[in-house]
Every structure is written in C-alpha cells, then in structure tokens.
Amino acid sequence: MAGQAEVEAMRRAVQLAQRGAATASPNPVVGCVVLDPDGRTVGEGWHERPGGPHAEVAALRAAGAAARGATAVVTLEPCRHTGRTGPCTRALLEAGIARVVYAVADPSAVAGGGAEQLRAAGVAVEGGVLAEEAEAGNARWLTAARLGRPQIVWKYAATLDGRSAAADGTSRWITSPQARADVHALRADVDAVVAGVGTVLADDPQLTVRAPDGTPAARQPLRVVVDTAGRTPTGSCVLDDTAPTWVATAAELGVGPDGHVDLQALARGLYARGVLRALVEGGPTLAGALLRAGLVDRVVGYVAPALLGAGAPALAEAGVATIADAYRLELLDVRRVGPDVRLEAVPRARGARQDEAEE
C-alpha cells in the first residue's frame, strides 16, 4: 500500500494539476510528483496545455538523473498512446522509474491501460490513491471520457419563492451585480454556454464572458442555442461576432421523445466540438428536459432575497409526479454573493431516500 510520503505527494499532485485548469482543455488536468527512494521530492510537473508536455514528462525533466529508481506519483493513470506527444509509459520506462502510484484509471479507450503496460515491463504499480480528490479536480474530463458527452452544469437565478421572472415576464435583474459577476466567472470556466430559443426570444442575451465594465474576455466559450424549429432571429445578440455560435436545430440533430431537439444528440454534438463542460443558462423548459434526459451533472443556483408570488418558475416540468420522484441533490457549497445566496450541488441517485425523517 501507498506510504505516507506517497499519499502526501499525491495530495501535492492534485494541487499541481489545478494549475492547468484554465489552459489544459480539452485535455485532462494532471499533476505528477517524483519521489526518490527516501521519499524526497525530486521533481514536479503538471499538464499545462494541449500539445505541451504531459505532467509525467515535466516532472521527469525536473528530476533528471534522480528519476532512476524513483517513484512517480500521478493523478491520472499514465497514458500509453502517441498523440501530439509520446506515451507517458515510455517516458517513465526510459527514465528508469521503479514504481508508479496513480489516483484515477484513464477511462479512454485510446490512452487507458498504461498501468498494465508498466506492470508488464516490471514496474510496481498501485492505483486508487486519493482517487476521490483527484476525481473532483478532473470531473469535466472524466465525465466526457466516460460518457462521450460534456459535463453539464445547469445554472439558474431565482427569487426566494423560486420565480425566475415576474408575472409580466420581466426578469432583469433578479440577482445582484455581484451574483452576475460570479456568473461571468462561471462562464469563463466552461467551453460552451447553452440557452433555449425561448430565452433568446425573451431576453436577447449575448451569452459571453464580460468584465464588469462590459469588456469581452479574450477567450469566449461556444454559444449554443437549442432551437427546434430554427426561430433564432438573424439580428440576435447571440449571433454577433463576439464569440462563435451554434444554433442546434431538429433538422440537424433530430427530434427527441418530447418533440423537441434530441438532447442526447446535442450532448454528443457538443463533445464532438471539443466541449468538455457546458453551462446551461436558460430557460426553465430546457432545464426540465435536460433533467428528464439525465443530462444534468451539477446545479449552480443564485437565490435572491426577494418574493414575487407569481411568474415563471426557475424549473419547468421535469418528470416529477410525486415527492418520491423528486430530484435530490447533495450540496457541495453554500455561500453569500453580495446580498444573494449561491448554492452548488450534484444530483443524487434518482429515488434516493431523504436522510432526515420528514413529518
């Protein structure tokens, strides 16, 4: 079993991996630490960008001759394929690494299997060390690699009584400037921003990443309009030249069980475009359809301390007929953003029982 020095090195490797969070996509974030036989760190590295050296190669370069007979501690199973760079398994063998400790197995058909290749070459290999921590930091890539679709985050803004718009249809602004700034930070962390055509027709959003003064960010995610019948007006803000846009129609993707755009085909289409994490911002009908299709991996809600009493709900029909069928979520984070509350959660298994007894 992994020793204390290796566990601590893995914790450090998880931290190193996050240095590539903003630049590694569509590749995974990976960190690596090389330990000499006495458990001392002799090299560190992380994957910074596509086409750049993988974490293991960067750590081996830092270690130099000290890598011979050493242990490589890495957050993701070393790859065994040749892409824009060579296989990490070969680099580890050529460097004389004697032991490899990794956190999460590589689920991809092309690159997975590196552990067995290393074992066959006489390297001692152990997997699963701090797997949960490494999974959390690499969730978007792992979701995409395992499911062939992006990690999908549904974001909503609502009043305390769950309304996303007033009775007259007005919805700007439910939440505060601080919450809206936080949303732009969230957009900056995804590869695509998705909205339904109803939101485009009602609000004419730009769906871009902007600074508080309105200046567009240098890197913009793909804008996606889910538009069954192709109703997006040609003059919509979402079609300007600030960022690329995909208007996803039923003519292109086919029709799902509800008569609208096939959402499974949409998810596959996003993945084919290199999208590993997509942010769904509107509206309630699209959110309900994604939940019914099992395509929501995370929920980020901004709740304003305001009451409307009437108006559109934040979530439309989602296939829940009775309380036993409710979508139960596990809260990951709750914090104030200005006067509002930001909640982040992941869905639990459908039909899971409440932990607390209810009267």
Image (spheres, grey):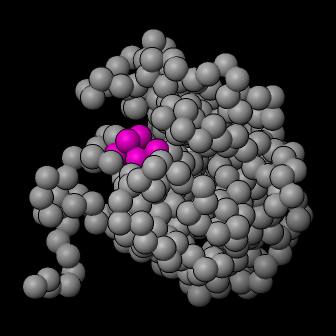
Considering the image in quadrants, where does the C terminus appear?
A: bottom left
Tally the numbered discs.
0
Q: Which residue lies at the image location 59% right of the left edge and 66% below the top edge?
A: 175
Magenta stretch in the rendered image: 283-288
Q: Nearer the viewer, residue 41 or 202?
A: 202
Choose top left, top right, bottom left or bottom right for residue 239.
Answer: top right
Q: Nearer the viewer, residue 309 or 30?
A: 309
Q: Quick check: can you spot residue 10?
A: yes
Residue 283 on image: x %, y %: 46, 44
Choose top left, top right, bottom left or bottom right for residue 219.
Answer: top right
Q: Which residue lies at the image location 65% right of the left edge and 41% below the top edge?
A: 205
Q: Which residue lies at the image location 45% right of the left edge and 49% below the top edge?
A: 168
On screen, residue 202 versus residue 207, left or right, reads left
Check the image and name the residue furthest to the front: 168
Residue 209 on image: x %, y %: 75, 49
Residue 113 on image: x %, y %: 51, 45
Q: Is residue 156 magenta?
A: no
As drawn, 183 above or below 220: below
As drawn, 246 above or below 14: above
Q: Quick check: can you spot residue 77?
A: no
As drawn, 180 above or below 225: below
Q: Nearer the viewer, residue 91 or 324?
A: 324
Residue 73 on image: x %, y %: 66, 68
Q: Which residue lies at the image location 53% right of the left edge and 67% below the top edge?
A: 302
Q: Is residue 286 magenta?
A: yes
Q: Nearer the viewer, residue 85 or 217?
A: 217
Check the image and name the residue furthest to the top: 251
Q: Does the magenta stretch mainly form a helix, a strand or a loop?
A: helix
Choose top left, top right, bottom left or bottom right for residue 139.
Answer: bottom right
